[in-house]
Amino acid sequence: MVIKIVFLFLAVMGILGMFGRLRFPGQAQLNRLKTNKRCPSCGRFKIGKGPCACKKGKG
């Protein structure tokens, strides 16, 4: 009985994932490209919207 419930849950989650991918194609890759920006002066990846650590004087 527990195996049936787990299988049903996984099937429903898979179907929801397919519908989400059809509704918003390419959104995950677009967000990834926007967030993976590098600092122009030191070349490290910037995390968040604030200035890079090299501009703050740390590191």
Image (spheres, rainbow, N blue to C red):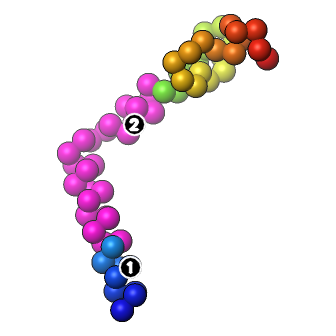
Residue type at numbered disc 1: Val
- Of helix, strand and loop, which mostly describes the magenta segment? helix
Q: Residue at x 25, y 50 (%)?
A: 20
Front-most of 10 and 43?
10
x, y (%) of residue 50?
Answer: 56, 15
Determine whether, in the image, residue 58 is placed left or right of residue 7.
Answer: right
- Badge count: 2
User: In the image as oriented, which residue stretches furthest toward the bottom?
Assistant: 1
**Residue under label 2:** 29
Q: Residue at x 38, y 79 (%)?
A: 6
Quadrant location of the C terminus in the rendered image: top right
Give SS at disc 1: helix
* Magenta-drawn segment: 10-34
Determine whether, in the image, residue 29 is placed left or right of residue 41.
Answer: left
Marks 2 and 1, the one that precedes in the sequence: 1
Determine whether, in the image, residue 31 is placed left or right of residue 39.
Answer: left
Instruction: Report crowding for label 1: few under 14, some 14 to 19, many 20 or more residues within 10 A (C-alpha).
Output: few
When asked about the image quadrant of residue 4, the answer is bottom left
Give SS at disc 2: helix
Quadrant location of the N terminus in the rendered image: bottom left
User: In the image as oriented, which residue stretches furthest toward the right?
Assistant: 59
Q: Nearer the viewer, mark 2 or mark 1?
A: 1
> Is 22 rendered above or below residue 18?
above
The answer to whether the residue labelled 2 contacts the one labelled 1, judged by CB atoms less than 8 Å apart, is no
Front-most of 8 and 24?
8
**Residue under label 1:** 6
Determine whether, in the image, residue 51 is placed left or right of residue 58.
Answer: left
Q: Residue at x 76, y 8 (%)?
A: 57
Whether the magenta-drawn stretch holds residue 45 is answered as no
